Amino acid sequence: MSKSDVLIPKSQSDLDDMMRQKRSKSLFTIVMLCLAILVIFFCSLFVGYAQITPQDVIHIWMGDGSWQNTYIINQIRMPRVACAAVVGAGLAVAGMAMQALFKNPLASPSVLGISSGAAFGANLCIAFGIGAVFGSFSISVMAFICCFVTLLVVFAIATTRHGTPTILLLLAGVAVGSFFGGMTSFLQFFVDDADILQSMVYWAMGSFAKCDWLDFKVSLLIVGVGVLMIMLESKELNLITLGDEQAKALGVNIPRMRVIVLIADALIVGGCVSISGTIGFVGLIIPHVFRTLVGPDHRYLSIICVLAGAIFLMIMDVAARSFSTMDIPIGVLTSLLGAPFFVYIMRKKKNEIW
């Protein structure tokens, strides 16, 4: 759509009508996504190697199912789908916040390297037990610490006396992400236990195959805090998209807001990576698609990203269980979708990026 096609309100009433239409469209989208997430959650329970019909699922919830089917649904599939929803919601919101903060549609946790940093921290815990003092939160804590360190390193490299140019930030993210990816491979080289090595390699590709209810509770707590922090900054994210100078003039404390959003992103990515491994491009695809559909108002877009991100990874999880008797790593599927989408955005927005 060319600039001449953009509708410009001629009066305050026209502006009010446009805002009302956008608000109605956003609310309608939220309602539709709420219905979709319930349907997809139910449908995902009877997809997998074990043949369980929708009638079996209903009987299980009514307490009439067989012991084997009840165990499969309640202890394997339900926590797996729930974890997929939490991770999808978290990564989508994290990507949305980064795209708003850096005013660039290519920004996402995976592109800026913090997912690789979180994966390195989690692998330190898995391979050598570093951080075991934190108990069941050990992997999450190590993932968060390395995720936050990665953010600091990326910003330190990209920041100049004139600010933090987006292109330098992206290049620094790619470089630092590659470094931590290499360090993760370096760790794998020194692991002697074949079972641990196999677990690290499979985990690095992203999967929910081993998720249980404890993983869901831990991730829901950590990711939920991060998502809430970003939602509370929705107004500031709306203002900062106007530009730093305009946002400052309207009273936004940009350094404070940037720190809060980046800490929230680190919490989200650390919590997600700790249970699912590395899953890329969710934070790139979902926010961009729905920002295009419903507009950039982050008060509604953040809620939409929670729902749409959850739906997206739930569908990816179903696809991973449907293609063969063995689970295809979800990170493989999202990369196959995300890489072409990344190229599409880069070409479409190249005049804004370079």
Image (cartoon, helix red, strand yellow):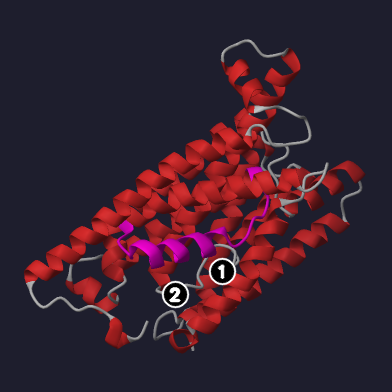
Instruction: Identify the residue shown where x is 27% and y is 80%.
Output: 6
Q: Secondary structure at mark 2?
A: loop
Q: Is residue 287 magenta?
A: yes
Q: Which residue is mark 1?
A: 112
Q: Earlier in the sequence, mark 1 or mark 2?
A: 2
**Position of residue 11 measured from the top left corner of the image (x, y, whole percent):** 8, 74
Instruction: Identify the residue shown where x is 78% and y is 45%.
Output: 327
Rendered image: mark on residue 104: 2
Rendered image: mark on residue 350: none
Determine whether 83 is above or below 17 in the image: above
**Position of residue 36 measured from the top left corner of the image (x, y, whole percent):** 47, 43
- The answer to whether residue 132 of the structure is visible from this angle is yes
In this orientation, which residue lies closer to the viewer: 145 or 258? Answer: 258
Image quadrant in which you'd find residue 161: bottom left
Instruction: Identify the residue shown where x is 76% and y is 59%.
Output: 184
Q: Which residues are magenta?
A: 275-299
Q: Nearer the viewer, mark 1 or mark 2?
A: 2
Q: Secondary structure at mark 1?
A: loop
- The answer to whether residue 193 of the structure is visible from this angle is no
Instruction: Identify the residue shown where x is 39% and y is 74%.
Output: 103
In this orientation, which residue lies closer to the viewer: 42 or 285? Answer: 42
Give the quarter of the figure containing the N terminus.
bottom left
Q: Is residue 193 left or right of residue 115?
A: right
3D distance between C-alphas at marks 1 and 2: 12 Å
Q: Residues within 10 Å of mark 2 (few under 14, many from 20)?
A: some
Q: Residue furthest top?
A: 64
